[in-house]
Every structure is written in structure tokens, then in C-alpha cells.
């Protein structure tokens, strides 16, 4: 029988949404391959979301606080600022001893929120690292995410969380300095590019359809000339993923994208920075949500662009209502 070393940290995961689940799955598979590691402990408000993790050997916790108590490193991947803040408040107001524990938050939140939760947890003796990711659910499944990482540098007695990131859940870590909010700022800035690119691809595909060029040739050009990311955004449109069936979960939901755009626009306003492209994308996403509801992908601004060109919001591959 292989014994675990007493110094081997126990890893926990909270948040099993469209991004959290594939990331936690890759982490559990990594832990399973290393006989010295403990299996992942996980928790989610809907605990059944982790059934596939349990099948891989991961262990469900009874509650968030049970997870925190049992683990040395706790990863979180949560949908918005409110949930992250509530989570940290639950932990900080409990009797749980969190000194010497490391919290790694992969959520996309406002830098001010990151700074607040960092101050709260570090004030109780914990280490807090912000580690938001670039790449959607499909990239998460392949373990090829890019991580931004902000927070205090590793010390001799601190767990190096990169060993659970690079080659496990991601292909690259971009260092963002000693303040955790630096990583959140990079993530928000990166989403300016993402949403502008989605808008541009949508415009190009509507142009291709209305002129008779056709979306297939345009998609080939986008993929070959502008890379797999842009090509992937095009496929979201041509395959109808921008408006998936009502009983499914969008990969990057329109409301989450609007939240990210709002964060960027609020920061830009405070720094006297103009983001006209992002403002256009944000307005089109809001119009898409108003027309088609919550079950839309962030790329659903394409549906609005279609209507502006005299086409139906829905295309032949999307849902039709």
C-alpha cells in the first residue's frame, strides 16, 4: 500500500459550472495519476453536479465549511461577484481556522471585489491568489487554459499551486504581480478583446450571408487567417451555438458576458478610457437577451446583427424561438 506523505496538501474545489466542472475533472485525473496525492474534495450548491467527479474517485464535502476544514488548498470557480463575496463572508464569519490555507479563485470578477476578498482572507492568516482563466468550456476540457495569477509570491512554507495548474488545467500562467487584483484586471482587459472579436466575427458573417458570399468561405478565411480562437467564434454562429436549445446551458452565457463588459466599462469610465467597440458589443448583447432570453451564448449579438440586416435572429442551425 502506498502511503500519502503528511506534507501532501489536500486539494478542494468549489463551483462546478460549465467551466468549474471540466477544470476540476482534469485536476482529479492528475491527482489520481500521482499516488502521493490525495483525491480531490469538492462541493457545489447542487451537489449532484459533481457525480462524474465522484465516479473518478473525488470525494464530496458535506458543506462549504466542511470543504474548507478538510482542505489545504481551495480552488473556487464562481459565476459572479455576489456569489464570491457571499462565499468568503460565510468562511470568514465562521469558526473555521483558515490560517495557513491557500485560496485560489478562478472566477471572473471586478478587481475591487478581488481586493476585498483578498483583504478579508489574508487578514485571517490565509493566502489568497486570484487566478482567472482565458478559454471557454471546450478549452477547459482539453486542459489548455491560460491562467492569470496575482497574489503574494511563494515562500518556502507556501504551497506552489502552479503544480496543479500547468500541464493539468492549463498550458500557461501569466504572472500579474503581488496584488491579487492584478490578475482580475488582466482578465477584464482580455475580455475586451474577446467580446470585440465576437462582434467583428458576427459582422463579417452577416456580411457574407447578405452579399451571397456564404458563411462557409468566410469561416474558412477567419480560421486560416485569424486563428483557431476566431474560427471557434465563427463556428458558434454557423452551428447555431449562439442560440442553443432551451434545455441546455450556454458555454459562455450572455448575462455573464454582459457582467464582464460592465466591469470593463466601469473601470474605463473611472480612468477616462473610451471603449467604443465594447460599448457596441455590450448593447448588442443586451438587445439579444431582451429578444431571446437568458439561454443565449455571449456570441448572440450575431442574432441582433442579423436582424439589423433584415434577417431573422435565428439561423438554420440555432433554435427557432
Image (cartoon, rainbow, N blue to C red):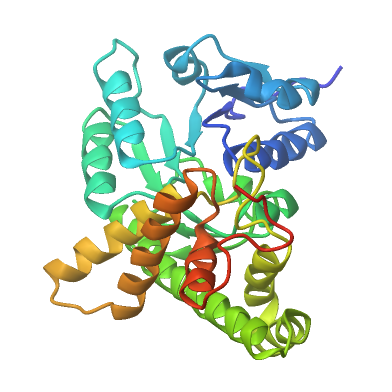
- Which of these two is toward me, 99 or 225? 225
Residue 51 pos. (x, y %): 72, 21
Give the residue drawn at x 71%, y 42%.
26
Quadrant housing the N terminus: top right
- Which of these two is toward me, 234 or 215? 215
- Which of these two is toward me, 128 or 45? 45
Extreme residue toward the front, this view: 310
Residue 296 pos. (x, y %): 54, 50
Give the residue drawn at x 72%, y 88%.
221
- Could you tell whether 242 is left or right of 218 in the image? left
Compared with 215, 225 (above or below) is below
Q: Quadrant of residue 138?
A: bottom right
Number of marks = 0
Give the residue drawn at x 30%, y 27%.
86
Residue 66 pos. (x, y %): 48, 12
Extreme residue toward the right, this view: 1
Amino acid at each position: 500500500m502506498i502511503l500519502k506523505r503528511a506534507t501532501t496538501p489536500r486539494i478542494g474545489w468549489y463551483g462546478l459550472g460549465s467551466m468549474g466542472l471540466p477544470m476540476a475533472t482534469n485536476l482529479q485525473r492528475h491527482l489520481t495519476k500521482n499516488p502521493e496525492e490525495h483525491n480531490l474534495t469538492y462541493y457545489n450548491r447542487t451537489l449532484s453536479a459533481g457525480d462524474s467527479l465522484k465516479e473518478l474517485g473525488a470525494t464530496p464535502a458535506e458543506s462549504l465549511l466542511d470543504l474548507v476544514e478538510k482542505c489545504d488548498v481551495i480552488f473556487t470557480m464562481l459565476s459572479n461577484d455576489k456569489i464570491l463575496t457571499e462565499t468568503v463572508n460565510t468562511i470568514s464569519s465562521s469558526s473555521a481556522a483558515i490560517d495557513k490555507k491557500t485560496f485560489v479563485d478562478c472566477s471572473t470578477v471586478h478587481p475591487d471585489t478581488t481586493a476585498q476578498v483578498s483583504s478579508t482572507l489574508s487578514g485571517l492568516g490565509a493566502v489568497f491568489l486570484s487566478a482567472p482563466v482565458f478559454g471557454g468550456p471546450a478549452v477547459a476540457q482539453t486542459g489548455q487554459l491560460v491562467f492569470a495569477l496575482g497574489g503574494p509570491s511563494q515562500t518556502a512554507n507556501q504551497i506552489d499551486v502552479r503544480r496543479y495548474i500547468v500541464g493539468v488545467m492549463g498550458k500557461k500562467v501569466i504572472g500579474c504581480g503581488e496584488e491579487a487584483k492584478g490578475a482580475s484586471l488582466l482578465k477584464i482587459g482580455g475580455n475586451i478583446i474577446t467580446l470585440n472579436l465576437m462582434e467583428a466575427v458576427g459582422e463579417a458573417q452577416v456580411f457574407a450571408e447578405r452579399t451571397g458570399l456564404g458563411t462557409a468561405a468566410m469561416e474558412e478565411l477567419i480560421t486560416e487567417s485569424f486563428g483557431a480562437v476566431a474560427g471557434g467564434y465563427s463556428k458558434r454562429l454557423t452551428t447555431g451555438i449562439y442560440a442553443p436549445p432551451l434545455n441546455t446551458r450556454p458555454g459562455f452565457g450572455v448575462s455573464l458576458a454582459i457582467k464582464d463588459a460592465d466591469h470593463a466599462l466601469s473601470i474605463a469610465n473611472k480612468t477616462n478610457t473610451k471603449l467604443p467597440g465594447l460599448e457596441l458589443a455590450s448593447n448588442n448583447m443586451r438587445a439579444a437577451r431582451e429578444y431571446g432570453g437568458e439561454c443565449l451564448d455571449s456570441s448572440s449579438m450575431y442574432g441582433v446583427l442579423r436582424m439589423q440586416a433584415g434577417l431573422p435572429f435565428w439561423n438554420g442551425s440555432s433554435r427557432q424561438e
